[in-house]
């Protein structure tokens, strides 16, 4: 029950935290029309609305509709809302506007778009399955800049809550489908994530849910320039993001610092020696170790049909020729996760760097190089690399802009002093 979208929505609504406007257990066309009309009327500032099937995942059972683009009575409803102000939540204030919106909803829904058209090509195909399974309606964040975040948590049988990792998401073909992660997250204050995660886990415990869970959030700046954090998904069980983070811990020997959710690794400094005139070797100091921060980009969703035509030894020869590898002493470089020797078209990849920009650049460079080396004009193959490449390029541009802003601010401070 709680592994389905409506069950997740029940848990989130019981947590006493900020969540997206929405409704669950929608399972008839009349209920869909009435519920959406009510949500649009009460939250007239929300432009896009999402429809999620109960039993789908990774955006396969999701569609969206840009309601305000097609709502003819929008200006009238907006004026009514401004007129009634704080009383807008009362039925007597919004009822006339609601009836206007309800009349337009059936025609507006014809413009809705499924996220994954390889599963549902049209809204008609989508809505037929949606009404059989049931599902939820949710508001899409009203912002041009939205970041997804995933928190991996373990609820022990004794009720202890352990936060295992918190990472930012990046995407490929759609902002509604997570492609991979950057760690550590840098989108919002860690305490906000901790507080929201703890409340959700406490609600899970009341439902007798224990073990591994993954919680998806979105964060954005609202119209008042206040940073919002909405939980939008909950997966019960051991997920691929759990597995990839455990792989990071294994090959780096890294230590997760729970106060700020960063990973430090131990770098061994060998003893320096000198040879005396009598050919006697003496150590200048004992072997030392120092801890360094590491930044990671990882994904278990890399897909390229041409990889099926390569044996793993050939693939790694290509990587070696491109200088794609891992330095075990420095804990820097690239590690691949190989899932199935009979289905080699899907792999995972992790890049480790001194800085986040270095890790993102390495991941981007690896994707571009691998695609170039295993593709030809006559055999481009089917891949999800390009969408991820585009998203990572935009992330790097944002990093460069932020660095320029920081440098400009520093120069102003220096000149004023």
Image: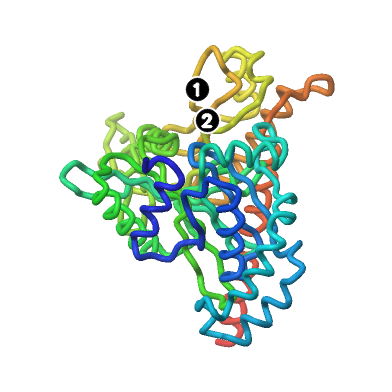
In front of the other: 49 or 142: 49
Residue at x 57%, y 13% (from the top left corner): 313
Q: How is the image coloured?
A: rainbow
Q: In the image, 270: left or right of 6?
A: left
The earlier-in-sequence mark between 1 and 2 is 1
Check disc 1 and report the residue beneath it. 338
Q: Is residue 182 above or below residue 347?
A: below
x%, y% of residue 193?
Answer: 39, 59
Q: Looking at the rendering, in which quadrant would you find the N terminus?
A: top left
In front of the other: 11 or 362: 11
One can see residue 315 in this view? yes
In front of the other: 29 or 329: 29
x%, y% of residue 409?
Answer: 60, 76
Check disc 2 and report the residue beneath it. 348
x%, y% of residue 269?
Answer: 35, 41
Instruction: Using the rendered view, name the quadrant where residue 315 is placed.
Output: top right
- Numbered disc 2: secondary structure: strand
View extreme (left): residue: 158
Q: In the image, 220: left or right of 204?
A: right
Instruction: Decide: few, some or many residues near mark 1? Use Cα within 10 Å; few <14, some 14-19, many ≥20.
Output: some
Are the residues flagged by discs 1 and 2 in contact, CB closer than 8 Å? Answer: yes
């Amino acid at each position: 029950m709680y592994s389905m979208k409506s069950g997740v929505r029940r848990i989130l609504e019981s947590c006493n935290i900020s969540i997206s406007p929405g409704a669950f257990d929608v399972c008839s066309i009349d209920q869909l029309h009435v519920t959406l009309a009510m949500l649009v009327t009460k939250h007239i500032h929300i432009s896009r609305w999402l429809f999620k099937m109960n039993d789908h995942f990774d955006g396969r059972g999701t569609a969206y509709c840009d309601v305000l683009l097609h709502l003819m009575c929008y200006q009238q409803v907006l004026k009514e809302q401004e007129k009634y102000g704080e009383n807008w939540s009362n039925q007597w204030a919004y009822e006339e506007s609601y009836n206007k919106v309800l009349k337009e909803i059936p025609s507006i829904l014809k413009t809705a778009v499924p996220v994954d058209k390889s599963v549902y090509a049209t809204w008609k195909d989508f809505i037929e399955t949606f009404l059989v399974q049931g599902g939820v309606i949710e508001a899409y964040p009203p912002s041009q800049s939205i970041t997804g975040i995933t928190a991996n948590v373990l609820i022990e049988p004794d009720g202890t809550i352990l936060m295992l990792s918190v990472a930012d998401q990046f995407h490929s073909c759609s902002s509604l489908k997570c492609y991979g992660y950057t760690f550590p997250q840098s989108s919002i204050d860690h305490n906000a994530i901790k507080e929201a995660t703890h409340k959700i886990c406490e609600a899970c415990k009341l439902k007798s849910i224990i073990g591994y869970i993954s919680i998806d959030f979105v964060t954005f700046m609202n119209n008042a320039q206040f940073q919002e954090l909405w939980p939008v998904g909950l997966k019960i069980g051991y997920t691929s993001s759990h597995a990839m983070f455990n792989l990071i811990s294994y090959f780096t020997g890294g230590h997760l610092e729970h106060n700020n959710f960063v990973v430090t690794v131990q770098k061994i400094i060998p003893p320096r020696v000198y040879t005396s005139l009598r050919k006697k070797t003496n150590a200048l100091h004992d072997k030392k170790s120092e801890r360094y921060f590491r930044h990671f980009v990882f994904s278990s969703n890399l897909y390229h049909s041409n990889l099926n035509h390569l044996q793993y030894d050939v693939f790694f020869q290509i990587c070696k020729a491109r200088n794609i590898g891992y330095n075990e002493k420095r804990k820097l470089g690239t590690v691949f996760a190989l899932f199935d020797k009979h289905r080699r078209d899907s792999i995972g990849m992790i890049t480790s760097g001194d800085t986040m920009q270095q890790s993102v650049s390495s991941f981007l460079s690896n994707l571009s190089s691998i695609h170039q080396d295993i593709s030809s004009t006559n055999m481009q193959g089917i891949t999800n690399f390009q969408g991820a490449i585009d998203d990572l390029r935009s992330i790097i541009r944002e990093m460069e802009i932020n660095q320029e802003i920081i440098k400009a601010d520093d120069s102003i401070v220096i000149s004023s002093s």
